[in-house]
Image: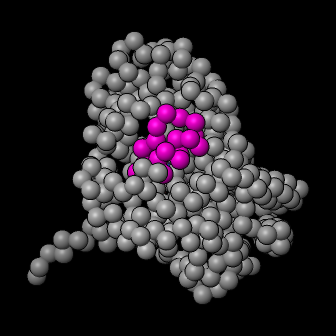
Amino acid sequence: MKRNKLSYIDDNIQALKDDGVYRELPVNYGPCDHVINLNGREVINLSSNNYLGFANHPRVMEASKAAIDKYGVGAGAVRTIVGNQDLLEELEKLLATFKEEEAVMAFQSGLNCNIGTIQAITQKGDLIISDELNHASIIDGVRLSKADKAVYKHSDMEHLEAILLEKRKQYNTVLIITDGVFSMDGDLALLPKIVELAERFDCLTYVDDAHGSGVLGRSGRGTVDHFNLHGSVDFIIGTLSKAIGVVGGYVATKRNVKEWLLHRARPLLFSTALPPAATAATIESVKMLMESETHTKKLWDNARYFKAELENLGFDIGKSETPITPVMIGEEAKTMAFSKTLLDEGVFVSGIVFPTVPKNTGRCRVMISASHTRDDLDKAILAFKKVGESLGVI
Ligand SMILES: *Cc1c(COP(=O)(O)O)cnc(C)c1O
């Protein structure tokens, strides 16, 4: 009999099922709106990163359609051959103005940006120091680098300082990397302190602001703007996939870094450039952000309202400082049961459990958007109350 060479995959899948972490993907039959058709049923969507409702905003969709008429649907090549359409140049200039930085290099996604940039800007003989809760794409970027690595406990500035005291002298360049907003808890990096340590120990700083761009700072300029640290962070990463509502990532930095990335960042050299419909859509979104603060204001109004109501009901929402609202449940099975019962009530909130977060810190993570109506939020609050009482969480 022929040996089943893939039976180890079956074993691995069985182990997922035994651990209760096997998942089937829900299917969304329409746009990622405040109310969605999930698996054929209308539910309130409290789980998207579409913070400002730009993912299906009419203005953004029009810009995207116009780009298809002019440019077609594909860039046709990597950026460094003939994929460099003028739309990309326009997007980068606009983002550099928005972020108040010298230059911006765009990538096909935030993940691509991290894995391409970290590897390109570090080399053997350098040290990368990273927060333990940094995003997986940072971890992957760090893994691809030939630099040595060290990890500090989440936002523990004494630990970061201890690592610098012990190791700084042994290395050429030292790069400190942190998320701007941590995606599982919604807390902010202690950027002023990180910048102070970086200056004292002569280190570079790298902030991945995927959840901060379009959310924090003036008109959503991000965490660096929120803390008024312009000029003090060497690499500011943003995504075009979350608040901007489309797809893509970028690094805002110095002109010479951009030049270097064009020669060494592998996603730019070996993967096709962003499609024109996406690039044009991101340009329109960024323009909308720059024109008015109404979008970010609505997002924060919604977030403040929802968070205050949940706290009044007695829920623990952790250390969130942003529209990311983790409703702490604790035990894994109970967290998943909470999420499932909410869905029965017509509210979709994903349950997040180990290994994405530490054991017994399971949570239903609510993502508030400017597109939510007061009625959506009130219905969701009622559902949380009902399920919280029935499962003994409040
Ligand atoms: C979502 C996220 C990314 C990935 O961005 P994509 O554009 O979706 O690839 C990178 N870093 C952080 C911190 C994120 O939260």
Q: Is residue 252 left or right of residue 188?
A: left
Residue drawn where x is 44% and y is 27% of the image: 175
Residue drawn where x is 38% and y is 21% of the image: 173
Q: Is residue 278 left or right of residue 210?
A: left
Residue drawn where x is 28% and y is 64% of the image: 76
* Residue 284, quarter of picture: bottom right
Q: In which quadrant of the rendered image does the N terminus lie?
A: bottom left
Residue 382 is a magenta residue: no
- Report the coloring of the rendering: one colour
Q: Is residue 34 above or below residue 95?
A: below
Q: Position of residue 272 (x, y in %)?
A: 30, 59
Q: Is residue 130 left or right of residue 112?
A: right
Does residue 272 appear in this view?
A: yes
Q: What is the residue that sits farthest to the bottom in this orientation?
A: 40
Which span is picked out in magenta? 91-107
Residue 106 is a magenta residue: yes
Q: Position of residue 258 (x, y in %)?
A: 38, 37
* Residue 8, quarter of picture: bottom left
Q: Is residue 143 above or below residue 157?
A: below
